[in-house]
């Protein structure tokens, strides 16, 4: 259920297998624990203790593998010396698709910043390879002294996104603006409270929210439960996709995955020009970048009232995904990087597990 795990690790497993890399996966939290966090806002303390104990035990088996692949960090919020000790004697690859180092170095408590501010920098400096989802993350790794840093964007699998969707009104015939996310990211929609309410006074539309809900008086809001099996169809049944963001260090580390989903479904996107969003959305070609209220209103109104423009921009977005933001492009690159990381140790490639 964790989006980062699905996109940055799990969907690469078939590529690893076909290339002769055997992978064993040990998640920190299971889906039940994550579901509880989404529903209650916090992990159950018993599941946290159990999960961390299991992670420590898995790390103690580290020397049975050629490489460890770590999503962000192995033991979040644990003292650095513990995680460093449990990574001694093994080569590891760290993958980032969020600026999680800002959880520490920009924490509101001074003692956290003092004790943990350079925690991830120290881990990156000793990694065999750091893979970042965008340049902001990669540059932090370089500044930390990581010896080898590469950028691989967060992408979709074209096999899950067939190129036969059209941007058109569905259901009651009204055009739909779609946003997909989770309870932890739904607060970004507050940025669009005024623009969407203003737009609703001008033209009729439905705001489709996938995965989380927010009340916007005056706006026709439709909630759709997220499931892995239905997310593509739920996005494709809309007209325009949106991604509002605050302009702060944390948001500059985001990888724009929902924009890539919209574009893969043939939808134009309107986004805040923050971080990698400005690279993914080519303004005026496959969507629009908007900051001010009137920019959001004008961009969305233009798309919702012009089906031909939606279609043209949607086709351009799809082409962009096929050329740069799909698993079919990044899968072979990821395999190559992991094999090169293993060869750097002068061992016999494929002799043990990854």
Image: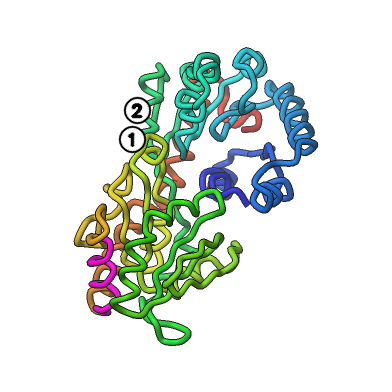
Q: Residue 196 or 302: which is nearer the viewer?
A: 196
Residue under pointer 1:
135
Q: Secondary structure at mark 2?
A: helix
Q: Residue at x 26, y 62 (%)?
A: 286
On the question of residue 226 being in view, the answer is yes
Q: Which residue is mark 2?
A: 139
Instruction: Assess whether residue 162 is covered by the magenta stretch.
Output: no
Quarter of the image for residue 50 reads: top right
Residue 85 position within the rendered picture, expressed as x and y whole percent measured from the top left: 65, 13
Label 2 neighbour load within 10 Å: few <14, some 14-19, many 20+ = some
Q: How many marks?
A: 2
* Residue name at image x 49 percent, y 27 percent: 108
Q: Residues within 10 Å of mark 1 (few under 14, many from 20)?
A: some
Which residue lies most toward the bottom here?
Answer: 172
Which range of residues does the magenta coloring cover? 296-307
Q: Quadrant of the C terminus?
A: top right
Q: CA distance from mark 2 to mark 1?
A: 6 Å
Instruction: Indicate whether 148 appears above or below 294.
Output: above
Residue at x 46% of width, y 29% of height: 102
Viewer-side residue, 234 vs 158: 234
Most prominent secondary structure in the magenta stretch?
helix
x, y percent for residue 264: 39, 63
Whole-percent x and y of residue 296? 27, 61
Going by the picture, which residue comes out furthest to the left?
A: 284
């Amino acid at each position: 259920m964790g989006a980062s795990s699905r996109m940055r690790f799990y969907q690469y497993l078939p590529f690893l297998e076909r290339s002769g890399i055997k992978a064993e996966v040990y998640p920190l939290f299971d889906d039940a624990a994550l579901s509880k966090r989404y529903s209650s806002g916090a992990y159950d303390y018993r599941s946290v203790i159990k999960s961390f104990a299991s992670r420590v035990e898995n790390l103690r088996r580290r020397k049975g593998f050629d490489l460890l692949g770590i999503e962000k960090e192995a033991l979040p919020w644990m003292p650095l010396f513990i995680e460093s000790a449990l990574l001694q004697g093994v080569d590891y690859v760290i993958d980032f698709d969020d600026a999680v180092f800002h959880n520490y170095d920009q924490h509101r408590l001074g003692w956290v910043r003092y004790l943990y501010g350079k925690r991830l920098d120290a881990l990156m400096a000793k990694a065999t390879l750091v893979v970042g989802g965008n340049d902001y993350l990669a540059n932090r790794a370089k500044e930390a002294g990581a010896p080898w840093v590469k950028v691989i964007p967060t992408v979709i699998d074209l096999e899950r996104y067939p190129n036969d969707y059209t941007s058109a009104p569905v259901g009651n015939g009204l055009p739909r603006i779609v946003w997909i996310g989770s309870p932890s990211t739904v607060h970004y929609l507050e940025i669009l409270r005024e623009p969407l309410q203003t737009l609703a006074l001008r033209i009729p539309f439905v705001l489709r929210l996938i995965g989380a809900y927010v009340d916007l008086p005056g706006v026709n809001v439709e909630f759709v439960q997220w499931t892995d099996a239905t997310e593509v169809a739920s996005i494709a049944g809309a007209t325009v996709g949106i991604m509002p963001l605050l302009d702060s260090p944390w948001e500059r580390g985001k990888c724009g995955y929902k924009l890539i989903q919209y574009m893969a479904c043939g939808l134009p996107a309107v986004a805040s020009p923050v971080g990698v969003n400005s690279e993914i959305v080519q303004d005026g070609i496959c969507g629009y970048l908007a900051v001010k209220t009137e920019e959001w209103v004008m961009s969305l109104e233009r798309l919702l009232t012009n089906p031909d423009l939606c279609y043209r921009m949607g086709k351009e977005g799809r082409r962009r995904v096929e050329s740069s933001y799909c698993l079919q492009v990044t899968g072979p690159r990821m395999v190559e990087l992991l094999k090169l990381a293993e060869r750097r140790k002068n061992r016999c490639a494929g002799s043990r597990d990854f």
